[in-house]
Image: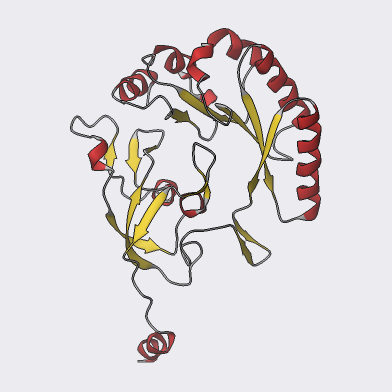
């Protein structure tokens, strides 16, 4: 969507002081209207930014109002993803220091990969950043690595399950894609399954998302939706979705019999 539509959509929101509108991607700062959006959305809306810092720091500091990304929270409003081999940690540190000097609160996040060399590098980088007064935190690796599934998930069999099952699911997040379509979960978003609504639909409201919806894809859930993580107060135990009435899988022997017939 164009900047005008994103501004219109954001201005429809009524959010608590501790609940921000998060801009993420991809890389949200690549949107041509990024600076218009952060300046022209109504002042009641606080924002968080998830970024790989693919932007000019001087331009960002000159163009972004400090108050937009300033609020009381136990973590930084601007959170930088560091992926070894994809972005340069020295450049990230330089940009982080510049943003901090300008008054922005910035945190860097690295993935604790199962591969020992990468894991050791992330921990060494964390130690280096912390010594410099930079907030560096680690995140759990989610998914398969060398035929082993990693991650702490609330619902057994939800990720890379052996079968797809029916369930009912409710999200705690308003997930919107670049075209403005609203999805019930990240799995639907990434696989382009039918959206639940469009953010600019005149009759769309919070009540439309705060319901349990029937789903036939339990077992192919996105790890981000069902992982156990900290909430916005940094209290561990939160998940992005709530799932109930998960269908019991058919017995393997019975399935084999059907296939044989």
Instruction: Quadrant for the C terminus, please.
Output: bottom left
Q: Is residue 224 left or right of residue 169?
A: right
From the viewer's side, name the closer residue of 202 and 124.
124
* Residue appearing at x 34%, y 18% in the figure: 4
Image coordinates for residue 135, horizontal then vertical, percent? 69, 30
Judged left or right of residue 202, residue 194 is right
Q: Quadrant of residue 150?
A: bottom right
Q: Position of residue 202 (x, y in %)?
A: 19, 29
In this rendering, the answer to whether 67 lies above or below 170 is above
Extreme residue toward the top, this view: 62
Q: Is residue 59 visible?
A: yes
Q: Quadrant of the N terminus?
A: top left
Q: Is residue 53 visible?
A: no
Judging from the image, the colouring scheme is secondary structure
Residue 185 vs residue 211, the one in the foreground: 211
Q: How many labels, in total? A: 0
Q: Is residue 104 above or below residue 121?
A: above
Q: Quadrant of residue 15?
A: top left
Q: Find residue 93 and report its horizontal and vertical position in percent.
A: 74, 25
Horizontal and vertical percent for residue 66? 54, 12
């Amino acid at each position: 969507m164009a900047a005008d539509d994103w501004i219109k959509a954001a201005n429809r929101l009524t959010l608590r002081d501790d609940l921000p509108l998060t801009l993420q991607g991809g890389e949200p700062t690549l949107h041509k209207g990024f600076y218009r959006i952060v300046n022209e959305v109504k002042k009641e809306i606080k924002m968080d930014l998830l970024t790989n810092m693919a932007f000019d720091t001087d331009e960002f500091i000159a163009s972004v109002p400090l108050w937009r990304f300033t609020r009381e929270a136990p973590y930084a409003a601007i959170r930088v993803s560091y992926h070894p081999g994809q972005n340069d940690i020295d450049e990230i540190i330089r940009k982080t220091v510049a943003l901090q000097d300008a008054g922005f609160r910035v945190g860097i996040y690295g993935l604790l990969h199962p591969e020992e060399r990468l894991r050791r590098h992330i921990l060494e980088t964390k130690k280096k950043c912390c010594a410099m007064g930079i907030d560096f935190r680690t995140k759990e690796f989610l998914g398969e690595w060398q035929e082993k599934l990693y991650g702490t998930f609330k619902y057994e069999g939800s990720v890379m399950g052996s079968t797809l099952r029916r369930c009912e699911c409710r999200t705690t997040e308003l997930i919107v894609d670049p075209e403005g379509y609203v999805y019930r979960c990240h799995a639907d978003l990434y696989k382009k399954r039918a959206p639940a609504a469009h953010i600019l639909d005149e009759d769309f409201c919070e009540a439309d998302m705060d319901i349990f919806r029937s789903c036939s894809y339990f077992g192919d859930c996105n790890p981000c939706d069902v992982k156990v993580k900290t909430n916005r107060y940094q209290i561990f135990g939160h998940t992005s979705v709530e799932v109930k009435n998960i269908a019991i899988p058919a017995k393997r022997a019975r399935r084999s019999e059907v296939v044989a017939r």
